[in-house]
Image (spheres, coloured by chain):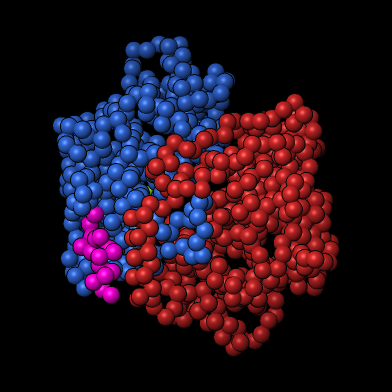
Amino acid sequence: MSMSDSLLRIEDLRTVFRSSNGDIAAVDGVTLEVPRGKTLGIVGESGCGKSMLSLSIMGLVPRPGRIAQGRVLLEEQDLASLSPAGMRAVRGAEIAMIFQEPMTSLNPVHSIGDQLTEAMRAHDAKASKAELKERAIEALRRVRIPSPERRFSEYPHQLSGGMRQRVMIAMALSCKPRLLIADEPTTALDVTVQAQILDLLRDLQAETGMSVILITHDLGVVAEMADEVAVMYAGRVVERGTAKDIFEDPQHPYTIGLLGSIPRIEEDRDRLLSIDGSVPPPFAFPKGCRFNPRCPFAIRACTEIDPPLRELSPGHRAACIRAPVELALDIAA
Amino acid sequence: MKEPALLEAIGVAKHYPVKKGLLFARQVGAVRAVDGVSFALHRGETLALVGESGCGKSTTARLVMRLIEPSSGDVIFKGENVTNVGGAKLRALRRHLQIVFQDPYASLNPRLTVADAIAEPMTVHGIGDAASRRERVQELLRLTGLRPFHADRYPHEFSGGQRQRIGIARALAVEPEVVVCDEPVSALDVSIQAQVVNLLGDLQQRLGLSYLFIAHDLAVVKHVADRVAVMYLGRIVEVAAKHELFSNPRHPYTRALLAAIPRPDPSRRGSVTPLGGDLPSPLAVPPGCRFHTRCPVAQAKCKELDPPLREIAPGHTAACHFAEDLPRFNAEADGGVAPVAQLRLAAYAAARAARAPAVVPAG
Ligand SMILES: Nc1ncnc2c1ncn2[C@@H]1O[C@H](COP(=O)(O)OP(=O)(O)OP(=O)(O)O)[C@@H](O)[C@H]1O
Ligand SMILES: Nc1ncnc2c1ncn2[C@@H]1O[C@H](COP(=O)(O)OP(=O)(O)OP(=O)(O)O)[C@@H](O)[C@H]1O
Ligand SMILES: [Mg+2]
Ligand SMILES: [Mg+2]
């Protein structure tokens, strides 16, 4: 992908936490592009650094964490080097984020309407109260909340989980961002509600032309929504490509193992593939390839060399010296 | 003639009164958490109970395990009505019905070592002496893919998948006949989920267990179940053998659930179709068919008449007035895993088998 097709470009990003044993990297050398008007899906299991990556983009890494290295380029502007005030302006106007648990991100003591108009006032200090109210109701209508006039004066606890997530989306979109980061936006929701929210996100993207980073551990959600996909493991991107690349031509053994681990509606297998062992915590990342202790294709070199992402076909990269694995198997046999 | 059911629920209900006023509290309504549920679990089978949050799955499980008292209805275990048994009989029943919970973090006592946690049900039921229990703990650790030295560790030292293995070992300690699995893999990562799902399958084969398997993930259910019961708002709306349910669902809600699942296949993008509306509260169950407020094919009749769960084909029951009239269901049989991906999955499985360790690894 050429530079100009992407809205956001993350270069060699490293986000660390200080500990008694030195810095621990939750995000460790990630390079990614977010295509304009498209959806980048980031998938990986718990603790692989998905949220830290998105918080790094937003300039919201919690203390004692910090960005230790790398750039976050929105067009030409490096967000990683902005002052807190500069970053706040970007967050208000160009990038917005929605989180997994809408209840914790809404304030329980203020009405939906107050929170929504408050968020809008931040970008438009001149608007009158009546104007803001009208816009807020319109925003609720846009995320398909029934009877938005009534909901305007209700409180978060009076809304279902799916409705609260709609309110969060309405708030995030109130500043007309060019990039929406959705961190597990449907993980806490039931499948039928999830389907409503995904449908809504897709429509809103078509309407506004915004780019979306969709973070999830659900491969079904990724396949349904993402144009481009990055698979993360232990703080790194281990494979990137189009959704078709990742699902139809998976190259990294971790991606293959993940695809084998998901039960599927359309087929019957006696056993799921499953990946042995579990994800190591950041302070215990192994030497060499971080997946090597769990990888059935690992050879000695994998315990020594930290494999870089290499391009296997145009735009499709995997960080594995054994890929494509069917050839590795022949050699071993 | 089929063998009689191992465990049976007949019209079981649980209504929680809702009271108003502090001093002279009067009942102003009821949460109909479970509202007349019947099903039978047969020996050696896995019956899945699926449905969305709050539909009454956990409450149903706790009712049939006699952990809470039903407002009405009967629970039958091995042909005996156990709805009102107490004392020694209830203790004996509890030994035969064990449960594995969703949250492996919350369901283990942080102050008990793994060995003590696994041995606890044996102590409670007065099974064996200290030495034989120790031996049994070792056997259970092996069985669930844990290591002998894990016995003296504490829960916080384990990953989620390992804790779920401990929970399973503990449930199996007293050799139950029925294991109720209440969302046993919902809190786990995909790769770990697969390990636990495989383990549950292995154990069932080895020990002849019967599972009441509660889940909201239909793909997991498709993998583990023999039969599936779909719940909506306190009721079972459809029951069928797994293949029948997935290929020929006869309740509009089952269809909506199936249509809502995003498939891990980008060539199917856009096939997810959302169901309109919100789930009604169990405090205000709609009259008539409780699904009519969201049903895409509801008719006037549905607003008034509550459809009973009735047999529409042998072994297939559905609670819909129009179950037979629904059009053929478009079960997309094609698709699935692309050829190259299939090749890689096979290579992965072969490589893994080639270096399989002696014990099932627990991670
Ligand atoms: N405040 C902190 N101090 C030290 N380490 C932290 C802190 N916050 C997060 N981490 C570590 O950073 C790593 C990445 O965490 P992150 O929240 O990004 O994971 P994730 O991929 O979003 O996982 P999940 O799917 O569970 O949300 C984890 O190993 C986590 O333990
Ligand atoms: N002790 C109680 N008092 C009042 N209402 C209750 C009580 N226990 C459960 N309920 C209600 O009964 C309904 C069914 O709850 P239950 O926990 O059985 O649902 P579930 O299907 O297991 O949901 P989930 O998928 O979220 O675990 C819910 O609306 C719940 O709020
Ligand atoms: Mg996260
Ligand atoms: Mg439950």
The correct choice, above or below, for A150 with respect to B287 in the image is above
Q: Residue furthest bottom?
A: B131
**Colour blue maps to chain:** A
Front-most of A105 and A31? A31
Front-most of A261 and B162? A261
The residue range painted magenta reads A318-333
Tell me the quarter of the picture where residue A284 sits: bottom left
**Residue B108's x, y, as percent?**
55, 65
Residue B238 visible in the picture:
yes
Q: Quadrant of the C terminus of chain B?
A: bottom left
**Colour red maps to chain:** B
Q: Residue at x 64, y 70 (%)?
A: B209
Tell me the quarter of the picture where residue B206 sits: bottom right
The correct choice, above or below, for A225 with respect to B316 in the image is above
Please tell me whether residue A61 belongs to the stretch shown in magenta. no
Residue A175 visible in the picture:
no
Q: Residue at x 22, y 30 (%)?
A: A86
Q: Quadrant of the N terminus of chain B?
A: bottom right
**Residue B168's x, y, as percent?**
56, 69
| Residue B152 appears left or right of A51 | right
The correct choice, above or below, for B132 with respect to B341 in the image is below
Number of numbered discs: 0
The correct choice, above or below, for A214 with respect to B45 in the image is above
**Residue B52's x, y, as percent?**
60, 44
| Residue A316 appears left or right of B215 | left
Q: Residue at x 58, y 82 (%)?
A: B136
**Residue A254's x, y, as percent?**
33, 59
Q: Residue at x 54, y 82 (%)?
A: B139
Front-most of B210 and A160? B210
